[in-house]
Amino acid sequence: MGLSFDPSFFLYELGVAVSYLPVVALLSGVPLLGGLALGTFFALCRVYRVPFWQKFAQGYVVVMRSVPMLLQMFLAYFFMKAVYGALSLSAADMDKTAIVAASLTLNAAGFLSEGVRSALLSVERGQQEAGESVGLTQMQIIRCLVLPQCLPVAVPVVGQGFISIIKGSAAAYLLGVIEMIQGTAMKTAGNYRYLEAYCATAIIYWGLTMLVERLTFALERKVRRHAG
């Protein structure tokens, strides 16, 4: 029997995939913001050699970049399961969506930290000296001189990181979180039309990544104009 494709079921699955966009937004938006904040902190600690935190950040980045994201997710799940057990709580009450979001956040922090660090190092040393010569504090120099000038380098890195997080969020189903791929696949029960389901999901993910790339490009041009 040849391969068949049902256009009507494909369109139906497109609608199903769209209905799971809030889940994708949650599992990618939260890790992006949290990972960027934590990654920026680690990058600043490494660039400015903050005692204790510099070494901690170096070790953290090595671990996050070495251990597969999927394994990190499983470790986070079993760690929380052990915590719930120690507190005599039921593991069934664990918020698996929160565990996935937290795991993706910690993973993103490791990768984004390297990108932000490279952006910080791209700013000329003379900017630091210029800020000190007019009496600015270290925090004022970072906030007013360094961060604005490193944005043109950091924005593309953050954009690519966001795309990786979006695609990585698809692994959430392994912890029992129903996301876009699993949600559309569940609708094939009885007709086994997985091709239509997966094609619909692929188009939505493609659209999301294209949107992020366009927004990243537009933001990069904007910050370059302001930096120039």
Image (spheres, rainbow, N blue to C red):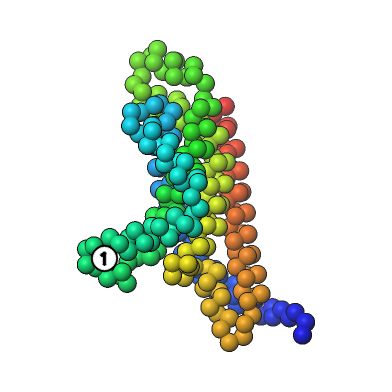
Q: Mark 1 points at which residue?
A: 85
Residue 43 placement: quadrant: top left
Tell me: residue 182, above or below residue 79: below
Residue at point 62%, 82% (across, down): 192
Coordinates of residue 226 in the picture (x, y in percent): 54, 31
Tell me: residue 88, above or below residue 43: below
Quadrant assignment for the N terminus: bottom right
Q: Is residue 62 left or right of residue 220?
A: left
SS at badge 1: helix
Residue 17 placement: quadrant: bottom right
Residue at point 73%, 81% (across, down): 4
Residue at point 60%, 49% (across, down): 213
Q: Which of 218 and 98 is in front in this view?
A: 98
Q: What residue type is labelled 1?
A: Gly
Coordinates of residue 193 in the picture (x, y in percent): 64, 80
Quadrant assignment for the C terminus: top right
Coordinates of residue 145 in the picture (x, y in percent): 45, 25
Coordinates of residue 32 in the picture (x, y in percent): 46, 49
Tell me: residue 89, above or below residue 124: below
> Is residue 144 visible in the rendered structure shown here?
no
Name the residue furthest top: 133
Tell me: residue 97, above or below residue 227: below
Residue at point 50%, 45% (across, down): 65
Q: Which of 64 and 36 is in front in this view?
A: 64
